[in-house]
Image: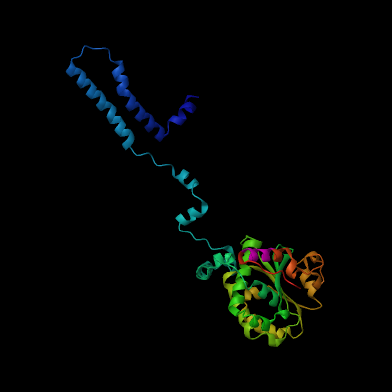
């Protein structure tokens, strides 16, 4: 019981504090304990001087003695995790980069460092705060949209390749550089606003109905090369599956060109579905309730298509409108 009562007073800091108080009070206690003595004026002056000296020394000790440093455990507990990592000189590599490099940490670190430089040089971290005046034109002449999630929770992205209107893009002075900037903007919106999970992936659907071999040239080919490189280098392991739907019999002629821009790990995720096999291919990864009605599913938005009116697209349009100003509602 006595030990429990004394424990708070037995730390080094408390012992030093109590010792200081004792030294301060002891001269006064000593003076008060002395019996009254007949003193001469000189004796009184000497006693007073001695008392003041005894009182001053402990006070000097009190203010000049440095406090004991806090326990290292207390210091560590107050440091945030991110700060603690910086103190240790650690810069953890995202797991996606390690998986994408098949556990080759040296290569993963090289790629991660390259991504950080790219993001800094291109100001990617602030791209979503920029106005985007080309947004409605690009969305109109380059049909693509987000709508729903796959069975595994991946965000579904659709691109209607056969309806890309290259002449209209050129007429409106939309360059390849503009398209690439938009693609990065859209990707950042997906992985920062639609989700903030660093391991969240996309289920990508490319509808190639109406595509001809002559389409794979000029601005389209340049854009395809640039976006493929960007996604593979700076957004690794973000794809669950890539579904190429409504592919004609001769599509493999185009595919032999396209796959040259895609790394082997990503190629393994590609599924090519004929027109008759489109719904079956989609249903393997997406519930029928999430598949748009034009692909044999059940999803529509109050009788309208999901291209402009899915929850994701309406939110995306609202985001851009807040940072750009008035953006007209799309017309199907």
Residue 286 quadrant? bottom right
Q: Is residue 135 above or below residue 253?
A: above
Q: Is residue 177 visible?
A: yes
Q: Is residue 214 above or below residue 108?
A: below
Left or right of 74, for residue 207: right
Residue 227 quadrant? bottom right
Colouring rule applied to residues: rainbow
Q: Is residue 228 visible?
A: no
Residue drawn where x is 60% and y is 75% of the image: 180
Left or right of 36, for residue 283: right
- Nearest to the observer: residue 304 or residue 284: 304
- Nearest to the observer: residue 262 or residue 321: 321
Q: Is residue 312 above or below residue 13?
A: below
- Nearest to the observer: residue 301 or residue 285: 301
Outermost residue, front side: 326
- Residue 41 appears at what percent x and percent y? 18, 17
- Residue 246 appears at what percent x and percent y? 77, 78
Residue drawn where x is 31% and y is 17% of the image: 32
Left or right of 16, for residue 313: right
Residue drawn where x is 64% and y is 61% of the image: 193
Highlighted magenta segment, given as a residue range: 315-322
What is the number of callouts on the image? Answer: 0
Any magenta on residue 8?
A: no
- Residue 96 appears at what percent x and percent y? 59, 65
- Nearest to the observer: residue 91 or residue 220: 220
- Residue 23 appears at what percent x and percent y? 32, 27
Main secondary-structure element of the magenta-colored stretch = helix
């Amino acid at each position: 019981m006595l030990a429990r009562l004394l424990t708070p007073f037995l730390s080094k800091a408390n012992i030093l504090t109590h010792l200081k108080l004792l030294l301060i009070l002891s001269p006064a206690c000593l003076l008060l304990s002395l019996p009254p003595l007949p003193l001469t004026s000189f004796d009184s002056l000497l006693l007073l001087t001695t008392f003041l000296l005894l009182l001053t020394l402990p006070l000097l000790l009190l203010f000049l003695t440095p406090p004991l440093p806090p326990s290292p455990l207390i210091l560590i507990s107050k440091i945030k995790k991110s700060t603690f990592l910086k103190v240790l000189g650690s810069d953890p590599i995202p797991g996606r980069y390690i998986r994408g490099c098949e556990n080759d940490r040296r290569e993963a670190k090289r790629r991660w460092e390259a991504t950080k430089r790219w993001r800094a040089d291109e100001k990617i971290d602030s791209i979503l705060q920029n106005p985007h005046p080309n947004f409605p034109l690009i969305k109109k002449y380059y049909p693509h949209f987000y709508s729903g999630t796959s069975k595994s929770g991946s965000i579904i992205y659709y691109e209607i390749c056969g309806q890309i209107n290259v002449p209209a893009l050129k007429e409106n002075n939309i360059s390849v550089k503009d398209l690439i900037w938009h693609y990065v903007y859209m990707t950042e919106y997906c992985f920062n606003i639609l989700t903030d999970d660093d391991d969240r992936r996309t289920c990508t659907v490319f509808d190639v109905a109406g595509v001809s071999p002559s389409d794979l040239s000029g601005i389209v080919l340049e854009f395809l090369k640039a976006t493929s490189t960007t996604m593979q280098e700076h957004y690794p392991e973000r794809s669950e599956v890539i579904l190429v739907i409504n592919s004609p019999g001769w599509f493999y002629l185009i595919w032999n060109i396209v796959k040259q821009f895609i790394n082997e790990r990503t190629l393994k995720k590609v599924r090519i579905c004929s027109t008759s096999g489109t719904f079956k291919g989609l249903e393997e990864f997406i519930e029928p309730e999430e598949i748009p009605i034009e692909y044999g599913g059940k999803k529509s938005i109050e009788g309208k298509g999901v291209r402009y009116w899915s929850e994701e697209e309406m939110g995306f349009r609202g985001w851009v409108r807040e940072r750009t100003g008035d953006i007209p509602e799309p017309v199907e």
